[in-house]
Amino acid sequence: MSDFGKVAVLFGGTSAEREVSLNSGSRVLAALQGQGIDVHAFDPATQTLDDLKGYDRAFIALHGRHGEDGTIQGALEVMHIPYTGSGVLASALAMDKFRTKLMWQAAGLPVPEYALLNADSDFAEIEEQLGLPLFVKPAREGSSIGVTKVKERGALKAAYEEAARHDPLVIAEKGVMGGEYTVGIVGDEVLPIIEIVPATEWYDYEAKYNRDDTKYLCPCGLPEAKEMEIRKGALEAFRILGGRGWGRVDFLMDEEGNHYFLEVNTAPGMTDHSLVPMGARVAGMEYPALVRRVLELAAND
C-alpha cells in the first residue's frame, strides 16, 4: 500500500464540463487503483462534502465552475484535506480570463489585444478596433463552451449574446492566427510544448474531445531558443497567478513569430485526448507516473 492514506478522486460535478470531467476522473481513478492506492470515486453532484470526512487527500479532476474556480478548493481548505492543483485564489484567477489578462499585463507578459463586452457596447467600433477574425468568450467557462469565432462585420453582437448565456462577463479577443500551442507544468518541471492543429476551423469543443483528426505535434517545431523562452515565460505566467502543483498554459503565435499567453488551466484534462499526458509522455513520464506525481504534490494553502 501507498503512504497517501485514503484518497478521493473528485470528478463529475455540476458544471457544463461534467462529461469531460467524468472521462478524466475515471482514468485517474483507474491509474491510481492500478498502483495499489486506497482511492475512491467522489462525485459532488451526488455526494455531500460531509462524505469527504476521513479522507487524507483529494485528487481534483473536476472541470469548470465549482471544480477549478476556487470553490471546491476552499471547501477542502476548511476540511484540512490536501488537494491537487492550485489554491483558492490562483484557481479563481485562472478561471477568469479577464482578470488573468489584467495580472499578466501588469507583469509585462504578452497577451492578445482584447475588449470587455456588455449589452451596451459599440460592437461596430470593437470590430474595427480588434479587426477580424476575433473570438468572443465567456470569461469564466472552459472547453471552448460559448466561444464564437467572428469572421464577418456585424456578427459581434450575436456572438456576445451567445457568450452571455454562459457568463455575464464576456470578452472579445483579437484573432492571433499563427498557431495554437500549450505547455504543461508539473511541479517545477515545464513539459515540452505541443502545437495543436485542428482539422476544423479552430480548436473548439468538438476538436478537443470528439474528433480524432486533430493533430498534436510534439516536438512542436519552434526553434529551440524560442521554445526555451516560451517555456520559461509559461512558468512565470503560471506563478504570477499563484499556480502550484500542476497546470497547463495555453498560448498563441502570430505570423511574425511573436507569442501571446492565452490562459491557464489549473485542473487540466486527463482524458485520452488531453494535453498534459501527451507532453509528459514525450518527457518520459507515462500516465500512471504522471497521476502519482500530481497526487504527491497535493497541498493546502
Image (cartoon, rainbow, N blue to C red):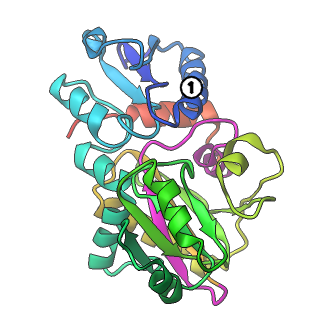
Indicate left or right for 249 with 244 as reference: right
Indicate yes or no whether the magenta region holds residue 39: no
Considering the image in quadrants, where does the C terminus appear? top left
Q: Amino acid at mark 1?
A: Leu
Residue 273, above or below 113: above
Indicate left or right for 28 with 219 as reference: left
Where is residue 259 shown, x and y percent of the image?
54, 79
Does residue 186 show up?
Answer: no
User: Closer to the camera, 246 or 250?
Assistant: 250
Q: Which residue is mark 1?
A: 22
Residue drawn at 23 percent across, 28 percent down: 75
User: Closer to the camera, 53 or 11?
Assistant: 11
Figure quadrant of residue 45: top left
Residue drawn at 41 percent across, 54 percent down: 188
Residue drawn at 67 percent across, 72 percent down: 179
Task: Name the residue at the left extreme.
Answer: 78
Where is residue 174 shown, x and y percent of the image?
53, 78
Where is residue 81 shown, x and y percent of the image?
25, 24
Give the extent of the magenta segment: 255-283
Does residue 3 show up?
Answer: yes
Residue drawn at 45 percent across, 12 percent down: 40
